Image (cartoon, grey):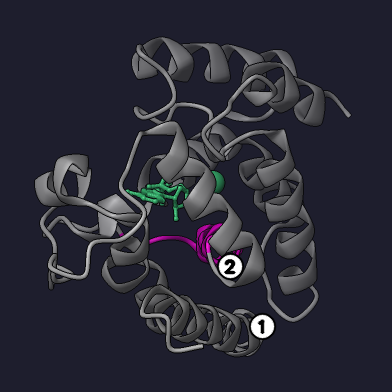
Amino acid sequence: MAVRNFAKEQLGEDRTGHGFDHIERVVNLTKKILKDETADRLITITAAYLHDISDDKLFADPAAQNELLNKFLADQNFSSSARTQINSIINNLSFSKTLTSNQYPLSPAGKIVQDADRLDAIGAIGITRAIYYGGSHAETIYDPQLAPRKKLTKAEYRDLTNETIINHFYEKLLNLKELLNTATAKKIAAGRQQVMLSFLAEFKAEWNAEK
Ligand code: ADP
Ligand code: NI
């Protein structure tokens, strides 16, 4: 499938936890959620494959990525309306976008892809990705003196100097459950939340030599 190959070409080399393995999991979760939701299947799955294609954390020149994406979609004969819908999903999906005041309402397709992307940030996979990301950004593992920050602004969220891997759970990952759109994703998230809570409790007990 051309869309899959294009996404693989663009993201296959990523080593910050947004690699093609993340994309494949998001696509699989998207397909699972789609079973219970009404949305355009082609647009939803295409957006899932391409949702990280112009992320400013991954690409030095997101505008160039956007151009590349639209050229690709036109070459694949996506209509102008389909291209607009896909662009609008990709550009408004991210967690950091939800921290800004002017949020753009997502389409039903966008809500599904957003849920799938968020599910891949929680549970056992989420724990692994947070540690992987933290390691690749030289983050501290844990600092009991450093209280998790409440209600982050976009600028604070990007400020890694004051972040620890454990605080990332309190500042973002444990809160994602409340932000989900679809019933299917909420159901999946409940179990994943428990996995994270057990992990954090065990981590702190071991940190304090309590067990
Ligand atoms: P989004 O694409 O929604 O903006 P991010 O790109 O910030 O999300 O996050 C991608 C992955 O990296 C997620 O699994 C997230 O939990 C993890 N991550 C992001 N920031 C940090 C951080 N400061 N410390 C640890 N993990 C992080
Ligand atoms: Ni993603």
Q: Residue at x 79, y 31 (%)?
A: 4
Asked if 6 appears above or below 27 in the picture, the reply is above
Asked if 51 appears above or below 189 in the picture, the reply is above
The answer to whether the residue bearing label 2 lies less than 8 angstroms from the nearest atom of ligand 2 is no
Write down the region rendered in magenta. 105-121
**Please, what is the dominant secondary structure of the magenta stretch?**
helix
Say if the magenta span includes residue 119. Answer: yes
Q: Residue at x 42, y 19 (%)?
A: 59
Query: Could you tell me which secondary element the residue under label 1 belongs to?
Result: helix
Residue 15 lies, in percent from the top left, at: 57, 28
Q: Quadrant of the N terminus?
A: top right
| Disc ID at residue 119 | 2
Q: Is residue 3 left or right of residue 136?
A: right
Q: Are marks 2 and 1 in contact (CB under 8 Å)?
A: yes
Query: Could you tell me which secondary element the residue under label 2 belongs to?
Result: helix
Residue 131 appearing in the image: yes
Q: Is residue 54 left or right of residue 45?
A: left
Asked if 145 appears above or below 65 in the picture, the reply is below
Asked if 160 appears above or below 164 in the picture, the reply is above
The three-letter code of the residue at mark 1 reads Ile
Residue 107 lies, in percent from the top left, at: 48, 61
User: Of 16 and 138, which appears nearest the observer?
Assistant: 138
Residue picked out by circle 1: 188
Quadrant in which residue 210 is drawn: bottom left
Say if the magenta span includes residue 161. Answer: no
